[in-house]
Image (spheres, coloured by chain):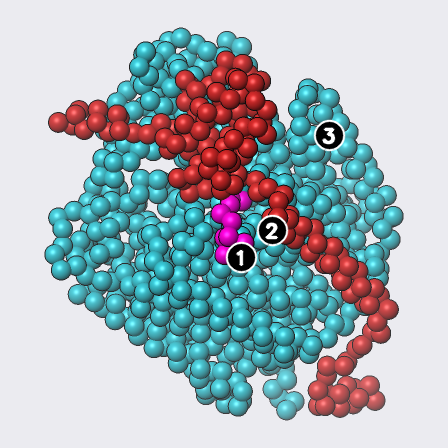
Amino acid sequence: MKYLILILALLASPAFAVQPDEVLADPVLEARARGLGQELRCVVCQGENIDESNAGIARDLRLLVRERLVDGDTDQEILDFVVGRYGEYVLMRPTWIGSNIILYIAGPVLLFFALFSGFFYLRGRGSAQNVTGADLSGDEEARLAEILKE
Amino acid sequence: MIIELGHFALILALAVALVQATIPLIGAHKRWPGWMAVAIPAANAQFFLTAFAFGALTYAFVTSDFSLKVVVQNSHTAKPMLYKVAGVWGNHEGSMLLWVLILTLFGACAAWFGTNLPPTLRARVLAVQSSIGAAFLGFVLFTSNPFLRLQNPPFDGQGLNPLLQDPGLAFHPPFLYLGYVGLSMSFSFAVAALIEGRVDAAWARWVRPWTLAAWIFLTIGIALGSWWAYYELGWGGFWFWDSVENASFMPWLIAVALLHSAIVVEKRESLKSWTILLAILAFGFSLIGAFIVRSGILTSVHAFATDPERGVYILFITAFFTGGSLILFAIRAQAMEAKGVFSMASRETALVLNNILLAVAAFVVFIGTVWPLVAEMAFDRKLSVGAPFFNMAFTPFMVALAVIMPIGAILPWKRARLRRAIKSMSGLIALALAVGVLVWSMQTGRTALGPVGIALGVWLVGGAVADLWMRTGRNEFLMRIRRMSKLPRADWGKALAHSGFGIAITGIACLTAWSEEDIRVAHLNEPFTVGTLEVTLLKVNRLQGPNYITTMGELSVTENGELITTLSPEKRVYPVQEMPTTEAAIYNGFLRDIYLVIGDPQQGGGWAVRTYIKPFASWIWAGCIIMALGGLTSLTDRRYRVAAGARKQRKVAMAPAE
């Protein structure tokens, strides 16, 4: 009985990520396939790319990418083909099209503004008057005056 | 019975929290000592009541009380004891209870160790802390009650997710929560200071140890999670830019910025309102993180079973505390006037730059994380933002930070000569560049990532050593060594944390640049080569574990005919959940890890075997641990301990004069 469970469990277990039978013989093409694998999302998984994923559909996509590579497609052609089928959702790196430009420029723009305002703040601090004792209360001022008199 | 007592204790804790959130606040406003003093016993009571509730839930897990719904859903009698206990926080309800427990623990700590605080500030800090406690106690009781019983208890539970049955992950959540929730202390201090209308050097000195403690825990928690991903997920990735990982990373970045800006408040009485804002943002990001994890609004591998009602409740908490404190900030921030005067070239400027880089980096992570949501709601586009985007958009900030860090660390306060600072570091700059070029020439036709990472590592670690060395003055060698050992612990902590950052950067860059991989069908006793290594599959055994069945391979790894190690990677199947996990076997070396994974048996005979050579992998986590140790060293600095004693003495001395 235990052995039966074991066999069933082993048979049922999904394949883990890239399998030996998928790997292309040409190391250059395989390296390109890996690069593309990082850029494509497994559509049924939770934020995994197709190289990391154990899902069947990810395996199909890995095989598809390799088939096209062997046929001589460029990386961009392959990405376009997959996007044509599944939509831009499969791209791990958002395109530079339309509203996505906001995503890309938000960081640099904020950095620019931060450096700009930081610069003016610092320049202000450089020329500011050194205020000492400004935050003392009335009692503390009196005590200070007393001490200074002595 | 114990369960019902625990449930009742939790309800009582909520009642106490409501009292503590209001009475001391009124007391502080009216200057009524009695009302203010309520905060201390209340903070104690809140903590002990929550601790009792947590103990009761743990008891239910340990004794496998299957009349409790959470225990049924997340435990099993065959599970090892460690995971029965870890199962308490391996689910949504229990982890929220842990969250509340830590929240009340920090409140109680403020009551215990805050005796040197001005009474009004302490009352306000405890009241604000308790209002957060009340919000989350309400959340647990009304939407995620772990003490719900079942009408018909089953004979056995459904077990814990096998991926979570791992020592690394058993301790990952408690550390992470100590970090997240620890930031609530800085938040409470910030809000209390806004109500008080006063931020000064003393305030910064009180708030910094709390932030430091939270940051240490957060660092360890994130490192544990990443280490777990590295060895458990079966292909050696350590950071995925998953939305939940980002949720933990944003508060970390802001906490680092806060630690540094609090130094400026403490030493130079400047950047006050900015520091307050960072304290609010740090905890705000913790809350947003909790929202992301619990609501399931962003897809993630880590998400708990989710429920829209809970999401709405947490969104409400997040909006209330972040929004409320930001409004308060807008009203009161002008009151915080800066006092210190300093020139453009100074330590202050370097720390401002540090804060800009860290805050903008956190913002970049934030916008990348929420962009899929924004794009869907505002532009009707379904899209993903994954690792390639974050690597591209985030890395430049860390490189810039690493480049300025050693120079900034040696600049004097107020007024510095930049040229002189660079000149004193010129030897180190030359060394770092030379090492980078050397590495560049040794590798052929690959990315600049490795050389740049190593050069930055040399620069950061060397910079930390040079910083300590320059503090010892112009003396003979032995005298300087002696002086070095007597430097304040804060200086040592800073040097350790900065070099830890350098070590981690080196590890990440080298691992990413030079990882080698081999995937193949291995036949028994037929050696194959990977890089300079020769790997042989010796045998494959099938064994029975406590609650799993395992396929364990035995592989020998030799290099130049010499045996380096024999490794036993496993593939486990947990029958209760019908779920397989991979247990990679890793040889941890100083310069490289050898990482072996065994897969499925193949049809034509043989087994799928994956071999990775991961250069400098251990450096990533070593760097994190050194960073955390740096924080710990800094935390034990004399000035934090002295501050308490000094104040007491002054009180005694002043008493007869009045």
Q: Marks 2 and 3, how far apart in space? A: 39 Å
| Residue segment shown in magenta | B376-385
According to the picture, the residue beneath numbered tag 2 turns out to be: A99
- Residue B378: mark: 1
How many residues crowd mark 2 within 10 Å: few (<14), some (14–19), many (20+)?
some
Q: Marks 2 and 1, how far apart in space? A: 9 Å
Chain that bears disc 2: A
Q: Of circles 3 and 1, which is in front?
A: 1
Where residue A70 sits in the image (x, y, percent)? 52, 17
Q: Amino acid at mark 3?
A: Gly
Residue lying at 17% horizontally and 53% vertically, measured from the top left = B66
Magenta stretch: residue B379 in it? yes
Residue lying at 43% horizontally and 48% vertically, measured from the top left = B299
Q: Marks 3 and 1, how far apart in space? A: 46 Å
Give the chain ID for the red colour: A
- Residue B392, quarter of picture: top right
Q: In the picture provided, is B141 more to the left or to the right than A104? A: left
The reply to whether callout 3 and callout 1 are in contact (CB within 8 Å) is no
